[in-house]
Image (cartoon, grey):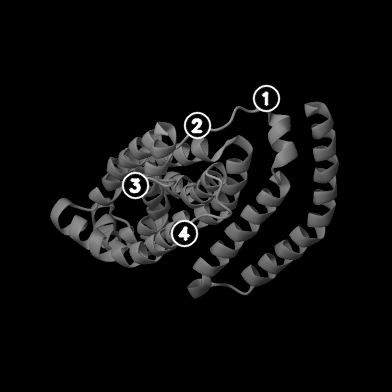
Amino acid sequence: MKTADKTRETPAFPKTFIMAMIFGVGLNPVNSTLISTALAPISHDLRIDAGRATLLISALYLTCAIAQPTAGKLSEIIGPRSVFMAGAALVMIGGLLGGFAPNLGVLLTSRVLIGAGTSCGYPAAMLLVRRRADRMGLAEPPSLVLSILAMVGLVLIAVGPPLGGLLVTFLGWRSTFFVNVLVGIITIVLGLASIEPDAKHEHRMTVSFFIAHLDVMGLLLFSITISALLIVLMSLPTLSTRCPVASLSSLCWLLSRGSCMRQRLSSMCVHSRRIVR
């Protein structure tokens, strides 16, 4: 009877778990807009033009476009808790690096790390919620939890600019990077307190194992295509007639080579799975 009562008193989704998911999911939308008010002070302090400063926004979006689907697949392979924690750690490292950055190159590296780290939050959180619901014998995750996580993303996109304005006004533009360290620490502490460890892996995490389970060639082609498109769009004001022709030719070449490269990747995956077995 005591055990049954204790089970009834323990919520399937405790507040610490939900708060950990909120912090993890919220890192990406808030960082997408937080830096917008800091671009002018960054341009002034680092003595760069406004056009180059906007690379800080493009770097995050480009990284997220590539890292988010990759993080989702990695969550299934190595476990959502590991990916969730690794993402928070990357955000902390990126925040520290950006806070002490002496030039634009270091700032771009910081934004790439922040983009990669924040991209881990949402896919890992969704899998953590799904698996926790399965362990609790629920047919599907509670709609309230999913609604909260969805609302977090929408609200924090709007909160980013005014929050960034307050930080820049009272603490300087570097505080827009240092705040990620604090949020990362909170996320890790909440995660350690509320997220169950991942199940033990049946296979060794070798290079051949990841090649067999990740679409490496697809990710590479997607990264090249998105990067090329971003370069073309950013050069539109001074775009020469040769640039579109070169870009279209490159895109046609990628598409023509894509099927061939995917066939090779499929054969590699089959061979790698045989090795793993």
Q: Residue at x 55, y 72 (%)?
A: 239
> Quick one: quadrant of the N terminus?
top left
Q: Residues within 10 Å of mark 1 (few under 14, many from 20)?
A: few
Task: Give the labeled residue for mark 4.
Answer: 146
Inspect this view and state whether residue 241 appears.
yes
Marks 1 and 2: CB-CB under 8 Å? Answer: no
Q: Earlier in the sequence, mark 4 or mark 3?
A: 3
Q: CA distance from mark 4 to mark 3?
A: 14 Å
Q: Earlier in the sequence, mark 4 or mark 1?
A: 4
Inspect this view and state whether residue 101 appears.
no
Q: Residue at x 71, y 64 (%)?
A: 251
Q: Which mark is residue 204?
A: 1
Q: CA distance from mark 4 to mark 1?
A: 33 Å
Q: CA distance from mark 1 to mark 2?
A: 18 Å
Q: CA distance from mark 3 to mark 1?
A: 35 Å
Q: Nearer the viewer, mark 4 or mark 1?
A: 4
Task: Give the labeled residue for mark 2.
Answer: 197
What amino acid is found at the position of numbered circle 4 in the picture? Leu
Q: Nearer the viewer, mark 3 or mark 1?
A: 3
Q: Earlier in the sequence, mark 1 or mark 2?
A: 2
What amino acid is found at the position of numbered circle 1 in the picture? Arg
